[in-house]
């Protein structure tokens, strides 16, 4: 991703990320995260408290800091615009404002898939056939998968609405992404993120909803978020934090948001070629990290289909 952004002039920054432990129990969670990262080849390192204080004096950390030195941020709209132009330059077509109404495997996929679509603006119904079907529909991926697979292989979708909070004061303004230590909940905790202009946001929290289109903001989420923020940024000006916007994450369960060991309830992305359905690859539960890992996911899907 860094190489692509550098060569194609897509704005990005290697901002790095800190995961913060305030007590011995949280420190142990960081050790688990560090061990897992090492096992899968992701670089992480422990930062001394003195180094942390020198680099980010406004950040409270009482026990330990685990740094991810390769974490970064990217201009998501610029990245998506590049990918859109790239697929069109390679002869691909994109059907915007179009919903899939049904999918019919032809001879279990060996003869392809018939996809029926409807235009959201004209209600025109169009059918296409394709040799392969890659289900990367985000919030709609599980319902689409369930439309094809037999009942015994269908799964229940979960939707986690997350509220983000903006910050308008000039200080404190750390320059590194800040995350609390994992607790085993369904969210990574209310963390500090930023955009390429330096604007700071906090969030997201988690609120389970039945409707994935529910993007209504809830002011009642603010007090709990402020308390969570103050655990690692005590100098925050509470009156300068306001509810900003919401997003909805596709989830495969309500277990842990972090892999912490066996029986932790963690549900990872599902990226698999479905048995008994030729040419059908499912991408399920792909939430926000799917954007920055999209190139790697694409390589994996290619290998599932053609190697």
Image: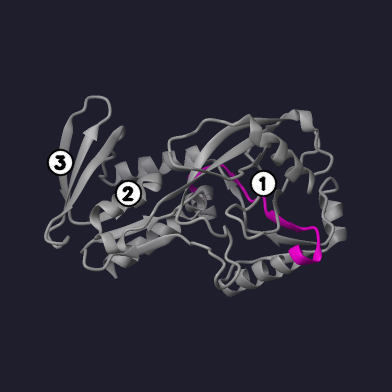
- Report the Cα–Cα distance between label 1 and label 3: 44 Å
Name the residue that disc number 1 marks: 190
**Magenta span includes 10:** yes
Q: Secondary structure at mark 1?
A: loop
One can see residue 136 in this view: no
Neighbour tally class for label 2: few under 14, some 14-19, many 20 plus, Cα within 10 Å: some
Nearest the eye: 92 or 204: 204
Report the residue marked by disc 3.
127
Residue nearest the observer in this picture, 205 or 302:
205
User: Quarter of the image holding residue 255?
Assistant: bottom right
- Looking at the rendered image, the quarter that the C terminus falls into is bottom left
Q: Earlier in the sequence, mark 3 or mark 2?
A: 3
Q: Residue at x 52, y 30 (%)?
A: 216
Residue bounds of the magenta highlight: 7-26
> Marks 3/2: CA distance?
19 Å
Helix, strand or loop at mark 3: strand
> Is 262 on the left-hand or right-hand side of 151?
right
How many neighbours does mark 1 have within 10 angstroms: few (below 14), some (14-19), or many (20 or more)?
Answer: many
Horizontal side of 20 relative to 304 (left or right) equals: right
Q: Nearer the viewer, mark 2 or mark 1?
A: 2
Q: Nearer the viewer, mark 3 or mark 2?
A: 2
Percent from the top left, x then y, of residue 276?
21, 67
Q: Horizontal and vertical percent for residue 118?
A: 22, 34
Write down the residue under mark 2: 143
Answer few, some or many: residues within 10 Å of disc 3's Cα (few below 14, many 20 plus, some between 14 and 19).
few
């Amino acid at each position: 991703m860094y190489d692509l952004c550098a060569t194609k002039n897509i704005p990005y920054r290697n901002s790095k990320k800190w995961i913060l432990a305030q007590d011995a129990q949280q420190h142990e969670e960081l050790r688990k995260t560090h061990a897992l990262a090492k096992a899968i080849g992701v670089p992480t390192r422990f930062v001394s408290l003195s180094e942390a204080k020198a680099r980010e004096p406004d950040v409270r950390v009482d026990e330990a800091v685990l740094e991810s030195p390769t974490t970064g941020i990217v201009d998501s709209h610029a990245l998506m615009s590049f990918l859109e132009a790239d697929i069109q330059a390679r002869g691909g077509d994109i059907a915007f404002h179009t919903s899939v109404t049904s999918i019919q495997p032809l001879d279990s996929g060996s003869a392809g898939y018939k996809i029926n679509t409807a235009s959201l603006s004209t209600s025109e119904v169009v059918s296409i056939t394709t040799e392969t079907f890659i289900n990367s529909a985000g919030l709609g991926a599980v319902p689409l998968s369930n439309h094809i697979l037999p009942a015994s292989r269908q799964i229940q979708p979960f939707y986690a609405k997350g509220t983000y909070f903006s910050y308008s004061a000039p200080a404190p303004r750390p320059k590194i992404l800040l995350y609390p230590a994992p607790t085993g909940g369904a969210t990574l905790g209310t963390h500090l993120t930023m955009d390429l202009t330096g604007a700071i946001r906090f969030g997201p929290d988690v609120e389970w909803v039945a409707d994935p289109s529910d993007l209504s903001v809830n002011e009642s989420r603010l007090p709990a978020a402020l308390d969570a923020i103050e655990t690692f940024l005590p100098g925050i000006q509470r009156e300068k934090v306001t509810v900003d916007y919401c997003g909805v994450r596709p989830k495969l369960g309500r277990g842990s948001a972090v892999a912490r060991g066996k029986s932790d309830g963690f549900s990872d992305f599902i990226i698999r070629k479905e048995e008994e359905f030729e040419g059908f690859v499912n991408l399920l539960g792909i939430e926000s990290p799917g954007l920055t890992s999209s190139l790697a996911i694409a390589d994996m899907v290619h290998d599932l289909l053609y190697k």
